[in-house]
Image (cartoon, grey):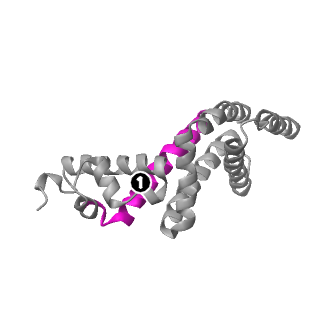
């Protein structure tokens, strides 16, 4: 029988859930989704495999929790940096500075790749990623709206979508080709901004 202190609504239960999610993320980084099994996660967390069913309703629930946390770890810092930029040119400089950092860590790039694989493999995980990306685009559109109060909503959404897609594309290309001329691409965007001013 499970200890009452491990119940999902207790502080100890919260810590146990956290432990299981962190163990799952570590496995996902190292071995991909095939390595994130009930037994492997429980073993890495040093706990009973039955707690995965107890806290998450089974492996699919744990996968969803891992996916949400991993998505947050990758997307949130990038969006926060962009939202903190003074203007578009500062955001371009931020992107250029962050690109090697974001793609330079093998475990982080593996995690990003596994999120895409997971989203394509499991429609429920795809919904989580879709919602996180929508949230990021909405935040970017909001920031653009403050910078350009005269822009109509459809333009704000369109530019936010282009920014998000550009980041994804540059990251993907940089993961594959570390010599990608990202600086040249971002300079070209800056020149387009100058022309459009």
Counting from the top left corner in percent of width and height, residue 186 is at 78, 36
Name the one closer to the observer, 26 or 61: 26
- Residue sitting at x 34%, y 55%: 40
Counting from the top left corner in percent of width and height, residue 166 is at 72, 47
Main structural element of the magenta stretch: helix, strand or loop? helix
- Residue sitting at x 71%, y 37%: 178
Label 1 neighbour load within 10 Å: few <14, some 14-19, many 20+: many
User: Farthest residue toward the bottom?
Assistant: 123
User: Farthest residue toward the right?
Assistant: 195
Counting from the top left corner in percent of width and height, residue 144 is at 67, 43
Q: Is residue 172 above or below residue 116?
A: above
Is-magenta flag for residue 48? no
Count every numbered label the image shows and give the total. Answer: 1
Residue designated by label 1: 66
- Residue sitting at x 62%, y 46%: 140
Q: Is residue 43 left or right of residue 182?
A: left
Q: Is residue 88 left or right of residue 85?
A: right
Question: For residue 158, which quarter of the picture?
Answer: bottom right
- Residue sitting at x 13%, y 51%: 5
Question: For residue 99, which quarter of the picture?
Answer: top right
Is-magenta flag for residue 58? yes
Q: Is residue 163 above or below residue 62?
A: above
Name the one closer to the observer, 63 or 42: 42
Q: Is residue 192 left or right of residue 99?
A: right
Q: Is residue 90 above or below residue 161?
A: above
Name the one closer to the observer, 166 or 140: 166
What stretch of residues is rendered in magenta? 55-84
Counting from the top left corner in percent of width and height, residue 45 is at 29, 48
In the picture, the quarter occupied by the C terminus is: top right
| Secondary structure type for disc 1 | helix
In the picture, the quarter occupied by the N terminus is: bottom left
């Amino acid at each position: 029988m499970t200890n009452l202190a491990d119940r999902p609504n207790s502080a100890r239960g919260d810590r146990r859930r956290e432990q299981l999610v962190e163990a799952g993320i570590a496995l996902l980084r190292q071995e991909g989704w095939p390595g994130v099994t009930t037994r492997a996660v429980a073993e890495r967390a040093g706990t009973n495999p039955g707690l995965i069913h107890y806290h998450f309703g089974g492996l699919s629930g744990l996968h969803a929790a891992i996916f949400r946390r991993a998505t947050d770890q990758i997307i949130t810092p990038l969006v926060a940096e962009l939202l903190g930029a003074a203007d578009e040119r500062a955001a371009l400089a931020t992107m250029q500075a962050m690109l090697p950092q974001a793609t330079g860590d093998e475990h982080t790039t593996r995690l990003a790749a596994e999120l895409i694989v997971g989203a394509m493999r499991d429609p429920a995980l795809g919904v989580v990623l879709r919602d996180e990306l929508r949230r990021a685009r909405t935040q970017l559109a909001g920031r653009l709206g403050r910078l350009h109060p005269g822009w109509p909503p459809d333009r704000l959404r369109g530019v936010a979508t282009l920014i998000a897609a550009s980041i994804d594309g540059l990251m993907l290309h940089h993961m594959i080709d570390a010599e990608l001329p990202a600086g040249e691409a971002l300079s070209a965007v800056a020149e387009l901004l100058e022309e459009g001013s």
